[in-house]
Image (cartoon, rainbow, N blue to C red):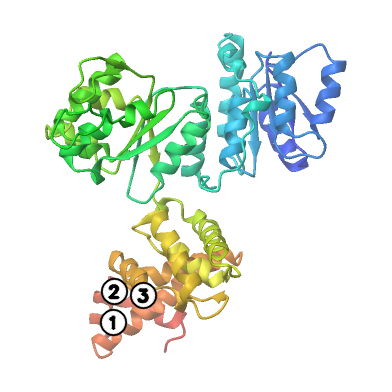
Amino acid sequence: MSDEYVWVIDDDQSIRWVLEKTLKQAGMQVSVFESADEVLQAMRDNAIAPDAIISDIRMPGSDGLSLLKTFKTDHPDTPVLIMTAYSDLDSTVSAYEGGAFEYIPKPFDVDTVLEQVKRACNVQKDERAASRAVHKVSNNQVRQEDPAELIGDAPAMQNVFKAIGRLSRSKITVLINGESGTGKELIAHALHRHSPRATKPFVALNMAAIPHDLMESELFGHEKGSFTGAQNTRIGRFEQSDGGTLFLDEIGDMPATLQTRLLRVLADGQFYRVGGHVPIEVDVRIIAATHQDLNALVEEKRFREDLYHRLNVIRIEAPPLRERREDIPRLLKHFLAKAAKELGEEPKLMSTDFEAHVSSLDWPGNVRQLQNTANWLTVMANSNDLTVDDMPEPDTKTARKRENNWESGFRQWANQQLLEGNTDLLGSAQPTMEKILIQCALNKTKDRRQEAAKLIGWGRNTLTRKIKELDME
């Protein structure tokens, strides 16, 4: 029997059973609890603390985050792994701020959880978990829900939430990569809001939206009379964000001369206004974002390599919608409700068919395009119950340009079947697909089976057998 002792807390009996069985098979000692209140009683009755805890968040009585706070007060070195089926940014950040060792969205892979528990136990034994124990949840860390909060249950978004949670006590520089419309500025806002600088300014500047000859003054400010038209002293974005966060969007569009000045500020923490002679010291956290490949820009000598390494300390990938299709219905529902509230109307309702259709599209404009579509549907859709025909034509055409019509239709069918809970999709689709191929090939060859079989990629005998099996005689 292993020396590792683990507690499992979850009100779901099946979860407790699976985890207990998995951990015991790995040679660990396990105690299971149905509620946080049972654990609190066990803490009072039992002097032996576990090497690690796995706890659900939502349970009858005290929740997992309250348990985390209480347990970490008495046993700060014990790693706690928080799991939940209700994964959102606030609960993820709260878990990490409360000292959670890991955050596990449900459903989970038991082998992955086992590895995380083993790692937690090893960290505890090596006394390396002490640095995590300082993340206490206090009253002044409770934040109101932001209407522009990040939304997503997909694994790709859960990775973003985890990164924000792990960085919640840090002022380290972050680089956000992602296609246009993926919500890079929302991620930057969340990094600022869930940080020690949350009460200080968040200042955003889009490098692609400012003329190059004005960018230096925009960033660093200028002194009165420093150039023609400079009638007053101007405070730049760096001074405006002192103590807080400066978000530099589309950093790949920053001209080379500005890259050099930015590098000096990052290195020295000070700069000169345009036309100024007195250095100005600032304490600013930099979060940069781009849709471009900065590595490629470095190779093309269009972006300084040393600045790239200064910015690329921590990288967060903002996933495109096509990599998080399961989030599309929830996001669209959110945007429909928001648009309806702004217009004073009832929110549009999505049918299962409609959800399957929008989930099958590629959304090249990502979340921004999805929000624009929600606004369009709120104004232009004929009825309150949305149908596929209500979708704006340009969006449908854009999706069809990206894939053949049959692929789009087949994807829609597959999503529909899955939403309805059907199984054996291949068993349903393959006979129909084969029948269509046979019919088309025979029509093309005017019923000459030898040629038709060749067009399909079969032998004649296979074609004959398939015709009989599919009752096509």
Q: Are marks 1 and 2 in contact (CB under 8 Å)?
A: yes
100 left or right of 250 in image: right
Q: Is residue 314 visible?
A: no
The answer to which of 145 and 199 lies nearer the viewer is 199
Q: Amino acid at mark 2?
A: Ile
Residue at 14% across / 34% down in the picture? 302
Q: Amino acid at mark 1?
A: Ala
- Taking depth in this image into account, of 347 and 19 the one nearest to the observer is 347
User: 256 or 215: nearer the eye?
Assistant: 215
Mark 2 crowdedness (10 Å alpha carbons): few <14, some 14-19, many ≥20: some
Residue wearing tag 1 = 441
Residue 355, x across and y down, in percent: 52, 66
Tell me the CA gap for discs 1 and 3.
33 Å
Q: Is residue 33 left or right of residue 194?
A: right
Residue displayed at 26% across by 19% down = 271
Choose top left, top right, bottom left or bottom right for residue 104: top right
- Residue at mark 2: 456
Q: Under tag 3, what secondary structure?
A: helix
**Amino acid at circle 3:** Glu
Marks 1 and 3: CB-CB under 8 Å? Answer: no
The residue at 33%/76% (across/down) is 461
Which residue has dot 3 on it? 393
Q: Position of residue 425 (x, y in %)?
A: 51, 66
